[in-house]
Amino acid sequence: MSRFEGKVVLVTGAGSGIGEGTARRFSDEGAAVVLVGRHKGSIAAVAADLPRNRTMARVADVSRPSQVESAVAAAVKAFGRLDVLVNNAGIFAGSSVTETRPSDWDRVMATNAGGVFHCSRAALPHLIATKGCIVNTASVSGLGGDWKMSAYNASKGAVVNLTRAMAMDYARRGVRVNAVCPSFTLTHMTADIAKNRKLMEKFRERMPLGRAATPADIAAVIAFLASDDARFITGVNLPVDGGVTASNGQPAMG
Ligand SMILES: NC(=O)c1ccc[n+]([C@@H]2O[C@H](COP(=O)([O-])OP(=O)(O)OC[C@H]3O[C@@H](n4cnc5c(N)ncnc54)[C@H](O)[C@@H]3O)[C@@H](O)[C@H]2O)c1
């Protein structure tokens, strides 16, 4: 498939997990890919696997507007345009409000919600020029509450509604904005949970399709939302969750 030949795609948090899977997927489909992340080593390692002439790795912290602006400018300088922004970088904090330090609240909000704002703000002029699109990695944790995930829930709820707000503001200028809402996905972020057999069993009980997602499962939907097949979709927060949000929350009986 070469749905993205001639297109330029910038992926944040591209050094691991869903971001890495997404960068690889767009590259496999012919795009020039700009991998953005905090750690040079991890984005460089992913980039080393991809075609040299259409890959770029750029260190930036998405919570820092000046770093994000430089990364977007470097991408446009290198490849002449920007067609797709994937706002994927994110961090997790597992605690209730009284257990959450204000500094952790600020960090999670600045990265997960602030990062989407800063990157979108820097990229939108270029996306308007190409009639491009944005795909955000939100979460099922932005659609409903979890136990002991207050800051994470708040930050992903912000991403969900920012997705809708940007979709409305930029639709008439030709830019679509959507989000994927993954459920439990096997990545660095969930590595400790994945090692806990009891907890994994509990998760499996709640997953109608009976397994966790892989980064490739999520990347495939991100690529779909960025593709021309999704040309009439904007403002959607699409669960990619193996059926988790189909449940009303009651346990299985028998
Ligand atoms: N794994 C899951 O179960 C799951 C479920 C729903 C949503 N998500 C979301 O998917 C996204 C990707 O997470 P993942 O599961 O692949 O985990 P991950 O930890 O493998 O990937 C997150 C990436 O974001 C990068 N990052 C973090 N803060 C950054 C910052 N300030 N600036 C730039 N890069 C930064 C990290 O270095 C890392 O490479 C996140 O937004 C996460 O909230 C994950």
Image (cartoon, rainbow, N blue to C red):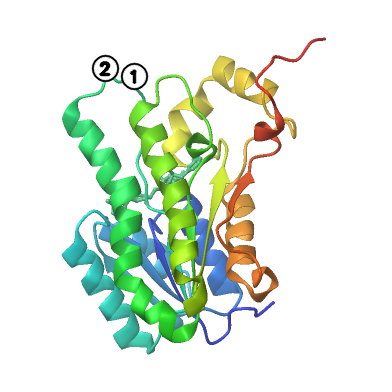
The answer to whether the residue bearing label 2 lies less than 8 angstroms from the nearest atom of ligand 1 is no
Q: Quadrant of residue 74?
A: bottom left
CA distance for labels 2 and 1: 5 Å
The answer to whether 174 appears left or right of 36 in the picture is right
The answer to whether 162 appears left or right of 135 in the picture is left
> Is residue 160 depicted above or below 178 in this figure?
above
Which residue is rendered at x = 44% and y = 28% of the image?
A: 192
Residue that lies at the very extreme toward the top in this rendered image: 254
Q: Determine the secondary structure under disc 1.
A: loop
Q: Determine the secondary structure under disc 2.
A: loop
Indicate the quadrant containing the C terminus: top left, top right, bottom left or bottom right. top right
On the image, the x and y values in percent for residue 2 come to: 65, 80
Query: Around disc 2, counting alpha carbons within 10 Å, would you say few (fewer than 14), some (14 to 19), or many (20 or more)?
Result: few
Q: Which residue is mark 2?
A: 99
Residue 93 visible to the viewer: no
Q: Which residue is mark 1?
A: 96
Indicate the amino acid at tag 1: Ser
The answer to whether the residue bearing label 1 lies less than 8 angstroms from the nearest atom of ligand 1 is no
Residue 96 visible to the viewer: yes
On the image, the x and y values in percent for residue 130 come to: 47, 85
The mark tally for this picture is: 2
Name the foreground residue: 29 vs 160: 160
Residue that lies at the very extreme toward the bottom in this rendered image: 80
Indicate the quadrant containing the N terminus: top left, top right, bottom left or bottom right. bottom right
